[in-house]
Image (cartoon, grey):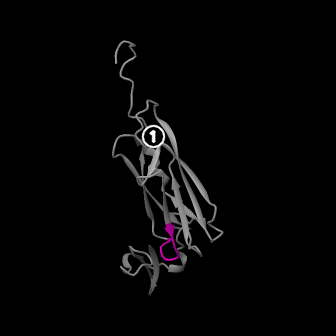
C-alpha cells in the first residue's frame, strides 16, 4: 500500500506493508523534493496504471504449465479491485484434470474487511495414468454476492497439463 503525503514543499512516498490493517504503520521510502503530492496521481502518472477491474486473478502463473507429476502445483493469487457492500464468495473449479486445494473445487470469501488482501489458490494436475499428451484444462472462477457488482461474474482461464504418461513401445509382442 503506497501513500503520497505532503510534508512541507516535498512529497513523501510511504509504504505500508499491510495496507489498511493495523499491524504495521507507513514508512517513508522516498522523498520527492519540491513535488506537490496532489500532482502525483497513483496509477495515472505512476505505475501500475489504475484499473477499474472488479477483481484480479494472477493468470501469469498459468503460462508455465502444470505437470501431472506428484506434488507439482501452481499457486496464484486473487484479489478484489474495490470494496464490496456484501461478502463475495469466489468458487474455483478445476474439472477432471485439475484439483483445487486437494479437491475438485474450493471457495474464497472476500469481505468489507479483507477485500484488498490477496488470497492464495493452489492447483494441482490429476495424475490420471492415461497417455493423452499435453492438454489444456480450464479453471473456472465464479463470483456470488448480494453485491450486484460482483454477483454472477465469471472468469475461465486455461493451463496446459503436461502429461507424464508415455507409450513404452509400439511393438505388439512386447508388454
The residue shown at (62%, 60%) is 153
Q: Position of residue 106 (x, y in %)?
A: 48, 58
Q: Magenta region, mostly helix, strand or loop?
A: loop
Front-lying residue, 8 or 115: 115
Q: Position of residue 98 (x, y in %)?
A: 46, 46
Residue 33, placed above or below residue 151: below
The residue shown at (44%, 64%) is 119
Residue tagged 1: 161
Q: Quadrant of the N terminus?
A: bottom left
Front-lying residue, 47 or 146: 146
Instruction: Identify the image quadrant of residue 21.
Output: bottom left
The residue shown at (40%, 16%) is 170
Q: Quadrant of the C terminus?
A: top left
Tag 1's secondary structure?
strand
Front-lying residue, 142 or 129: 129
Residue 76, placed above or below residue 109: above
Q: Is residue 69 visible?
A: yes
Q: Residue furthest right?
A: 148
The residue shown at (64%, 61%) is 152
Magenta residues? 109-115
Amino acid at each position: 500500500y503506497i501513500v503520497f503525503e505532503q510534508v512541507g514543499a516535498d512529497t513523501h512516498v510511504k509504504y505500508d506493508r499491510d495496507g489498511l490493517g493495523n499491524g504495521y504503520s507507513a514508512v517513508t521510502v522516498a522523498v520527492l523534493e519540491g513535488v506537490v503530492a496532489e500532482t502525483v496521481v497513483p496509477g495515472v502518472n505512476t505505475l501500475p496504471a489504475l484499473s477499474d477491474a472488479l477483481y484480479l486473478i494472477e493468470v501469469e502463473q498459468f503460462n508455465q504449465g502444470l505437470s501431472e507429476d506428484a506434488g507439482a502445483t501452481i499457486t496464484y493469487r486473487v484479489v478484489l479491485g474495490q470494496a464490496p457492500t456484501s461478502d463475495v464468495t469466489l468458487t474455483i473449479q478445476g474439472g477432471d484434470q485439475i484439483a483445487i486445494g486437494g479437491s475438485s473445487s474450493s471457495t474464497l470469501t472476500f469481505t468489507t474487511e479483507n477485500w484488498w488482501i490477496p488470497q492464495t489458490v493452489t492447483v494441482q494436475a490429476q495424475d490420471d495414468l492415461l497417455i493423452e499428451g499435453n492438454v489444456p484444462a480450464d479453471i473456472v472462477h465464479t463470483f456470488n454476492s448480494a453485491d450486484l457488482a460482483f454477483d454472477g461474474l465469471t472468469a475461465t482461464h486455461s493451463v496446459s497439463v503436461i502429461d507424464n504418461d508415455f507409450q513404452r513401445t509400439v511393438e505388439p509382442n512386447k508388454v
